[in-house]
């Protein structure tokens, strides 16, 4: 099987869907003439033309609103935010228009739209460009929130998101666009809301999503050297959440560590921990532990960034705590 970059997997998904359905178009800052800020849309202007690959002003609220109106009138926009940090300017359109339109119109209007772009930290970009917004958007009914961790999932999930008749928040990472992985050449889709067991194990369950999956898998490999067998689950989407896969794993391993990049309060890990204690309390042999970012705006200095973000060492430490190792 061929190996391609994360950005190429996203591009293939958009290209294939735009060839399939002429109602689909891409809009956002620098997506056309510049081939995308991260080169995700490279070559798309040449193939599809300026009516379907549209450069916008630096005005997220404006072009998000245009996209919502287009979706209500039968088109299927893909909106690229240069970073979801900038989506805060457009959050009124995302939350108060796109997410609620089906309900407010009594089912008369659907809003088939994908808002996509990078989320969370991306190196030395400091506080205003490093926030993880998955839990923010997952809090809102009417939205679906997808956070892929590898090129294969990215392509299959983006195709599903584009075909979905509800608004989908599709969250990537600047630090993953160059990641390489195996992606089939043939047509495939991955349903939204189905988690993936990346590694089977028997001693502890580790759950994560997005680029932090790298830390979860690295921790599992380190733990394996010490004789601890970790089952690693990639949620892939955080609204809806595949609770069943996680709960079934916990019933087998009896221990759970959840890893995510968001701040700890009201995070996806908070929700998942609640659901597991509600549905699988009698199976737990230790309290559920979470590994999140520090509860501070992300600093600029590399040493402080390292101290703030989840990493494999912190995951290993949490696993050993729920395993009562070295107690």
Image (cartoon, rainbow, N blue to C red):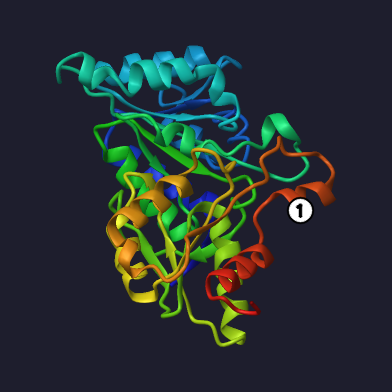
The image position of residue 101, as x and y in percent, is: 27, 18
> What residue is rendered at 68% in x and 67% in y?
313
Name the residue located 38 percent from the left edge and 49 percent from the top edge. 274
The C terminus, quarter of image: bottom right
Q: Is residue 207 above or below residue 73?
A: below
Task: State the image coordinates of residue 177 (x, y, percent, origin top left).
Answer: 59, 50
Give the image location of residue 86, x and y in percent.
59, 25
Q: Could you say which is closer to the camera, residue 312 or residue 314?
A: 314
Q: Nearer the viewer, residue 230 or 320?
A: 320
Label 1 residue SS: helix
Task: Indicate left or right for 298 with 152 as reference.
Answer: right
Residue drawn 55% across and 17% down?
89
Confirm whether residue 190 shows in the render. Answer: no
- Identify the image quadrant of residue 113: top left
Left or right side of 179 for 52: left
Q: Which quadrant holds residue 25?
A: top left
Q: Is residue 50 above or below residue 18?
A: above
64 with respect to 291 (left or right)? left
| Image height of 300 relative to 277, above or below | above
Front one among 107 and 161 = 107
Can residue 201 be spotted in the picture? yes
Residue labelled with disc 1:
306
In percent of width and height, residue 105 lies at: 19, 14
Q: Residues within 10 Å of mark 1 (few under 14, many from 20)?
A: some
Question: How many labels, in total?
Answer: 1
Asked whether 95 or 319 is in front, the reply is 319
Instruction: Point out the image quarter for the N terminus.
Output: bottom left
């Amino acid at each position: 099987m061929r190996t391609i970059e994360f950005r190429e997997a996203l591009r293939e998904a958009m290209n294939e869907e735009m060839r399939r359905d002429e109602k689909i178009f891409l809009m956002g800052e620098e997506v056309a003439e510049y081939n995308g800020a991260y080169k995700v849309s490279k070559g798309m202007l040449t193939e599809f033309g300026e009516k379907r690959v549209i450069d916008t002003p630096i005005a997220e609220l404006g072009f998000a609103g245009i996209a919502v109106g287009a979706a209500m009138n039968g088109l299927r926009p893909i909106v690229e935010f240069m970073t979801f940090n900038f989506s805060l300017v457009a959050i009124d359109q995302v939350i108060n228009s796109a997410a609620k339109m089906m309900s407010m119109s009594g089912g008369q209007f659907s809003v088939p739209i994908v808002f996509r772009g990078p989320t969370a930290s991306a190196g030395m970009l400091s506080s205003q460009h490093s926030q993880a917004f998955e839990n923010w958007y997952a809090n809102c009914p009417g939205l679906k929130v997808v956070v892929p961790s590898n090129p294969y999932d990215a392509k299959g999930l983006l195709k599903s998101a584009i075909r979905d008749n509800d608004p989908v928040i599709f969250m990537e990472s600047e630090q993953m666009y160059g990641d390489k992985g195996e992606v089939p050449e043939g047509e495939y889709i991955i349903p939204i809301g189905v988690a993936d067991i990346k590694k089977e194990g028997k001693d502890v369950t580790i759950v994560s999503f997005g680029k932090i999956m790298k830390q979860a898998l690295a921790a599992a490999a380190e733990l394996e050297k010490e004789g601890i067998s970790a089952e690693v689950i990639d949620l892939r989407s955080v609204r809806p959440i595949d609770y069943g896969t996680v709960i079934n794993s916990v019933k087998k391993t009896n221990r759970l560590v959840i890893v995510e990049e968001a701040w700890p309060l009201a995070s996806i890990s908070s929700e998942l921990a609640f659901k597991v204690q509600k549905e699988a309390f009698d199976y737990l042999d230790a309290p559920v532990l979470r590994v999140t970012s520090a509860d501070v705006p992300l600093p600029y200095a590399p040493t402080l960034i390292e101290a703030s973000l989840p990493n494999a060492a912190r995951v290993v430490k949490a696993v050993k705590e729920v395993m009562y190792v070295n107690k």
